[in-house]
Amino acid sequence: MRIVTIPPPDAHPRDAVAAAVRALGEQAVVAWCGELVRGADSRHPLAFLGGAEDWPDHWRREWGVRGLRYAWGDGADATVLLALGDDHGRVRAMAVAVAVARGVDEALPAVEALRDDPVPRVRAAVDRALVRWAAR
């Protein structure tokens, strides 16, 4: 029997996702993050992403994208692109951050289009991302 250790609630997301990768495998975590971004119910404990089962839907989607900051594989770039168009600003802002951190260059036009986003958090994420992209 395999013992799975759930990270503590105060674990850094990097450490929580690393525990998920050890338990499930990196590609399974990437697929799960994609499911969360698409609004599916979670099939694994959200503690693997540093979360709680009573999270609002937009937090699940945001942390699904955040998980891709620490786990990457097939389909991750498509998930980031999808999240850039999410209805909630927190999800869009995290998708911008992950896009630049992971070098998802095909996201650049969508990121640039968010310069005029109505949510200040998104506009700030775009400004930071464009500076990082320009510095490459």
Image (cartoon, rainbow, N blue to C red):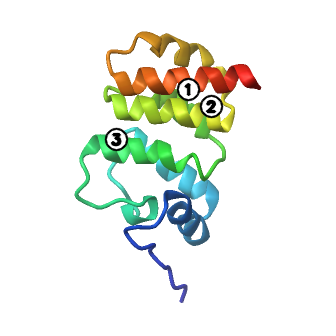
* Sooner in the amino-acid sequence: mark 1 or mark 3: 3
Q: Which mark is residue 128?
A: 1
Residue 113, position as x, y percentages in the image: 49, 11
Quadrant location of the N terminus in the rendered image: bottom right
Amino acid at circle 1: Arg
Q: Label 1 to label 3, Cα distance in Å?
A: 27 Å
Question: Label 3 belongs to which residue?
Answer: 39
Q: Residue 13 carries which label?
A: none
Quadrant location of the C terminus in the rendered image: top right
Q: Label 2 to label 3, Cα distance in Å?
A: 23 Å
Residue 69, position as x, y percentages in the image: 58, 46
Q: Which of marks 2 and 3 is in front?
A: 2
Identified at 49% across, 46% down, the residue is: 66
Question: Label 2 belongs to which residue?
Answer: 100
Amino acid at circle 3: Gly
Q: Nearer the viewer, mark 1 or mark 2?
A: 1
